[in-house]
Image: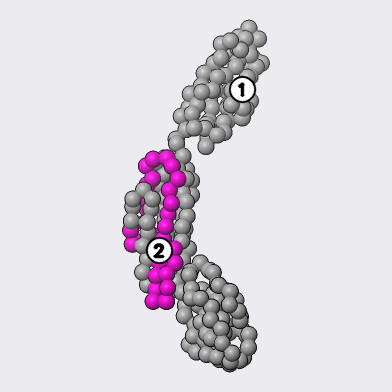
Amino acid sequence: MNLYYASIGFALLSSAGLYLAKDNLASTTVNTNTKTIKTERGNSGVKSETTIKTVETASPNNAEATLAILPSAEIFISRASGCAPLNVKLSAGLNHVDQYQWYLSDGTNTSLKSFDHTFVNAGEYEVELKIKNKNGSNTIKKVIKVLNPALAKFGLDSKKSDKSSRKLAFSNQSQHAERFEWHFGDGATSTEKSPEHTYKIHGQLLGYAHILQ
Protein backbone atom coordinates (compact mmCIF):
# COMPACT_ATOMS: atom_id res chain seq x y z
CA MET A 1 0.00 0.00 0.00
CA ASN A 2 1.36 3.46 -0.92
CA LEU A 3 0.72 6.55 1.15
CA TYR A 4 1.31 10.24 0.34
CA TYR A 5 1.47 12.86 3.05
CA ALA A 6 2.87 16.32 3.77
CA SER A 7 5.39 17.00 6.52
CA ILE A 8 4.76 14.94 9.67
CA GLY A 9 1.43 13.14 9.61
CA PHE A 10 -0.70 10.16 10.51
CA ALA A 11 -1.57 7.31 8.16
CA LEU A 12 -4.83 5.39 8.59
CA LEU A 13 -4.33 1.65 8.34
CA SER A 14 -6.92 -0.97 7.45
CA SER A 15 -6.22 -3.28 10.39
CA ALA A 16 -4.42 -3.43 13.72
CA GLY A 17 -0.89 -4.81 13.88
CA LEU A 18 2.81 -3.97 14.15
CA TYR A 19 4.03 -1.98 11.13
CA LEU A 20 7.32 -0.73 9.74
CA ALA A 21 7.16 2.69 8.07
CA LYS A 22 10.07 3.50 5.75
CA ASP A 23 10.33 6.74 3.77
CA ASN A 24 12.82 9.49 2.99
CA LEU A 25 11.92 11.44 6.11
CA ALA A 26 12.02 8.89 8.93
CA SER A 27 11.40 5.34 10.09
CA THR A 28 9.43 4.12 13.08
CA THR A 29 7.36 1.21 14.33
CA VAL A 30 4.12 1.37 16.28
CA ASN A 31 1.52 -1.04 17.60
CA THR A 32 -1.47 0.15 15.67
CA ASN A 33 -4.41 -0.97 17.77
CA THR A 34 -5.69 2.53 17.03
CA LYS A 35 -5.17 1.83 13.30
CA THR A 36 -2.76 4.76 12.89
CA ILE A 37 0.97 5.09 12.32
CA LYS A 38 3.05 8.22 12.95
CA THR A 39 6.25 9.17 11.13
CA GLU A 40 8.77 11.77 12.32
CA ARG A 41 11.90 13.49 11.04
CA GLY A 42 15.23 12.94 12.74
CA ASN A 43 18.60 11.18 12.69
CA SER A 44 18.17 9.26 15.93
CA GLY A 45 18.16 5.48 15.90
CA VAL A 46 14.84 3.73 16.23
CA LYS A 47 14.36 0.74 18.52
CA SER A 48 11.42 -1.61 18.85
CA GLU A 49 10.69 -5.28 19.45
CA THR A 50 12.12 -5.92 15.99
CA THR A 51 15.39 -4.41 14.73
CA ILE A 52 14.68 -2.05 11.82
CA LYS A 53 16.71 0.02 9.39
CA THR A 54 18.63 3.15 10.40
CA VAL A 55 16.73 6.41 10.01
CA GLU A 56 17.40 8.34 6.82
CA THR A 57 16.53 12.00 6.18
CA ALA A 58 15.74 14.01 3.05
CA SER A 59 14.48 17.46 2.14
CA PRO A 60 11.16 16.94 0.26
CA ASN A 61 7.97 17.79 2.12
CA ASN A 62 6.08 15.14 0.22
CA ALA A 63 7.36 11.57 0.06
CA GLU A 64 6.08 8.12 -0.65
CA ALA A 65 5.94 5.73 2.33
CA THR A 66 5.68 1.96 1.96
CA LEU A 67 4.11 0.14 4.91
CA ALA A 68 5.34 -3.40 5.51
CA ILE A 69 3.60 -5.35 8.26
CA LEU A 70 5.91 -7.20 10.67
CA PRO A 71 5.18 -10.51 12.43
CA SER A 72 3.88 -10.40 16.00
CA ALA A 73 2.91 -13.06 18.50
CA GLU A 74 2.02 -13.74 22.11
CA ILE A 75 2.85 -16.78 24.26
CA PHE A 76 0.10 -18.30 26.39
CA ILE A 77 1.05 -20.66 29.26
CA SER A 78 -1.53 -22.56 31.31
CA ARG A 79 0.70 -22.52 34.43
CA ALA A 80 3.76 -20.31 34.82
CA SER A 81 4.86 -22.00 38.07
CA GLY A 82 4.17 -25.11 40.10
CA CYS A 83 5.67 -28.24 41.63
CA ALA A 84 7.63 -30.83 39.67
CA PRO A 85 6.62 -32.65 37.59
CA LEU A 86 4.80 -29.65 36.10
CA ASN A 87 2.39 -30.22 33.22
CA VAL A 88 1.71 -27.12 31.12
CA LYS A 89 -0.02 -26.25 27.86
CA LEU A 90 1.76 -23.75 25.63
CA SER A 91 0.11 -21.97 22.73
CA ALA A 92 0.85 -19.02 20.46
CA GLY A 93 -1.32 -16.17 19.27
CA LEU A 94 0.14 -15.37 15.83
CA ASN A 95 -0.38 -12.32 13.62
CA HIS A 96 1.04 -12.13 10.09
CA VAL A 97 3.46 -14.99 10.79
CA ASP A 98 4.72 -17.28 8.00
CA GLN A 99 7.16 -19.38 10.06
CA TYR A 100 7.48 -20.07 13.78
CA GLN A 101 9.50 -22.36 16.03
CA TRP A 102 9.49 -23.10 19.79
CA TYR A 103 12.70 -23.57 21.78
CA LEU A 104 12.53 -24.73 25.43
CA SER A 105 15.64 -24.62 27.60
CA ASP A 106 15.20 -28.28 28.60
CA GLY A 107 16.09 -29.19 25.01
CA THR A 108 12.58 -29.46 23.55
CA ASN A 109 11.94 -27.93 20.09
CA THR A 110 8.69 -27.98 18.12
CA SER A 111 6.89 -26.21 15.28
CA LEU A 112 3.39 -26.94 16.62
CA LYS A 113 1.16 -23.93 17.29
CA SER A 114 0.07 -25.39 20.65
CA PHE A 115 1.30 -28.40 22.63
CA ASP A 116 1.43 -30.01 26.07
CA HIS A 117 4.74 -30.39 27.88
CA THR A 118 5.96 -31.78 31.21
CA PHE A 119 8.91 -30.24 33.06
CA VAL A 120 10.25 -33.15 35.11
CA ASN A 121 12.84 -31.45 37.30
CA ALA A 122 12.77 -28.32 39.45
CA GLY A 123 14.34 -25.16 38.01
CA GLU A 124 13.65 -22.12 35.84
CA TYR A 125 13.00 -22.82 32.17
CA GLU A 126 13.03 -20.33 29.31
CA VAL A 127 10.36 -20.61 26.64
CA GLU A 128 11.35 -18.95 23.36
CA LEU A 129 9.15 -18.47 20.29
CA LYS A 130 10.82 -17.29 17.07
CA ILE A 131 8.57 -15.91 14.34
CA LYS A 132 9.22 -14.72 10.80
CA ASN A 133 7.57 -13.36 7.67
CA LYS A 134 8.92 -11.78 4.46
CA ASN A 135 9.29 -8.37 6.15
CA GLY A 136 11.20 -9.38 9.26
CA SER A 137 11.45 -11.57 12.34
CA ASN A 138 10.90 -11.40 16.08
CA THR A 139 11.57 -13.43 19.23
CA ILE A 140 9.30 -13.68 22.27
CA LYS A 141 10.45 -15.19 25.57
CA LYS A 142 8.84 -16.23 28.84
CA VAL A 143 10.04 -18.08 31.95
CA ILE A 144 8.42 -21.05 33.71
CA LYS A 145 9.41 -21.75 37.34
CA VAL A 146 9.26 -25.38 38.49
CA LEU A 147 9.49 -25.95 42.26
CA ASN A 148 10.58 -28.96 44.26
CA PRO A 149 7.54 -30.90 45.53
CA ALA A 150 6.65 -30.25 49.16
CA LEU A 151 7.40 -33.12 51.57
CA ALA A 152 5.34 -33.33 54.78
CA LYS A 153 7.09 -34.37 57.99
CA PHE A 154 5.75 -33.40 61.43
CA GLY A 155 5.11 -34.83 64.88
CA LEU A 156 4.84 -33.99 68.57
CA ASP A 157 7.56 -32.08 70.41
CA SER A 158 7.71 -33.99 73.69
CA LYS A 159 9.90 -31.39 75.41
CA LYS A 160 7.38 -28.58 74.87
CA SER A 161 4.20 -30.63 75.28
CA ASP A 162 2.37 -31.05 78.60
CA LYS A 163 -0.16 -33.86 78.39
CA SER A 164 -1.49 -33.21 81.90
CA SER A 165 -2.77 -29.80 80.80
CA ARG A 166 -3.69 -31.12 77.34
CA LYS A 167 -1.11 -28.80 75.74
CA LEU A 168 0.56 -30.25 72.65
CA ALA A 169 3.47 -28.73 70.75
CA PHE A 170 4.10 -29.81 67.17
CA SER A 171 7.47 -30.12 65.46
CA ASN A 172 7.47 -29.38 61.74
CA GLN A 173 10.37 -30.59 59.60
CA SER A 174 8.59 -30.44 56.24
CA GLN A 175 10.68 -29.58 53.17
CA HIS A 176 10.08 -27.18 50.25
CA ALA A 177 6.93 -25.77 51.88
CA GLU A 178 6.02 -22.08 52.07
CA ARG A 179 2.66 -22.14 53.89
CA PHE A 180 1.03 -24.40 56.45
CA GLU A 181 -2.55 -25.12 57.49
CA TRP A 182 -3.03 -27.07 60.71
CA HIS A 183 -6.36 -28.62 61.71
CA PHE A 184 -6.36 -29.96 65.29
CA GLY A 185 -9.57 -31.99 65.09
CA ASP A 186 -11.55 -29.86 67.55
CA GLY A 187 -12.36 -27.06 65.09
CA ALA A 188 -9.23 -25.02 65.85
CA THR A 189 -6.69 -24.20 63.15
CA SER A 190 -3.29 -22.55 62.80
CA THR A 191 -1.02 -21.26 60.03
CA GLU A 192 2.18 -21.28 62.12
CA LYS A 193 5.04 -23.53 61.07
CA SER A 194 5.30 -25.37 64.41
CA PRO A 195 2.23 -24.43 66.46
CA GLU A 196 1.13 -25.25 70.00
CA HIS A 197 -2.45 -26.09 70.88
CA THR A 198 -4.31 -26.73 74.13
CA TYR A 199 -7.29 -29.09 73.97
CA LYS A 200 -10.26 -28.38 76.22
CA ILE A 201 -11.37 -32.00 76.59
CA HIS A 202 -9.77 -35.44 76.85
CA GLY A 203 -10.28 -37.99 74.10
CA GLN A 204 -9.06 -39.10 70.71
CA LEU A 205 -9.21 -36.52 67.92
CA LEU A 206 -7.95 -36.68 64.37
CA GLY A 207 -5.62 -33.81 63.48
CA TYR A 208 -3.81 -33.13 60.22
CA ALA A 209 -1.73 -30.51 58.44
CA HIS A 210 -1.63 -29.15 54.89
CA ILE A 211 1.73 -27.99 53.54
CA LEU A 212 1.60 -25.63 50.56
CA GLN A 213 3.91 -23.94 48.08
Q: Residue at x 63, y 19 (%)?
A: 197
Q: Position of residue 21 (x, y in %)?
A: 52, 80
- Report if residue 135 lies within the magenta region: yes
In percent of width and height, residue 213 lies at 52, 37
Residue at screen point 46% across, 74% down: 70
Compared to residue 152, the image places residue 120 above or below, namely: below
**Colouring scheme applied when the structure was drawn:** one colour
Helix, strand or loop under label 1: loop
Q: Which secondary structure, mark 2?
A: strand
Image mark for residue 130: 2
1 vs 2, front mark:
2
- Circle 1: is it few (<14), some (14-19), or many (20+) Cα within 10 Å? some
Q: In terms of image quadrants, where is residue 38?
A: bottom right
At label 2, counting other C-alpha atoms closer than 10 Å, the crowd grade (few under 14, some 14-19, many 20 or more) is some
The image shows residue 117, relative to residue 35, as above or below, that is above
> Main SS of the magenta segment?
strand
Q: Which of the numbered marks, if any, corresponds to residue 152?
A: none
**Magenta region:** 110-139
**Which of the two residues, 212 or 98, is positioned nearer the viewer here?**
98
Residue identified by numbered label 1: 195
Q: Reading the chain from its start, which is encountered first: label 1 or label 2? A: 2
Q: Is residue 121 magenta?
A: yes
Disc 1 to disc 2, C-alpha distance? 51 Å
| Circle 2: residue type | Lys
To which quarter of the image does residue 113 belong? bottom left
Q: Image check: 36 left or right of 126? A: right
Residue displayed at 53% across by 68% down: 48
Q: Nearer the viewer, residue 190 or 131?
A: 131
What is the x, y in percent for residue 45?
A: 55, 72
Locate residue 84: give its quadrant. Answer: top left
**Residue type, numbered disc 1:** Pro
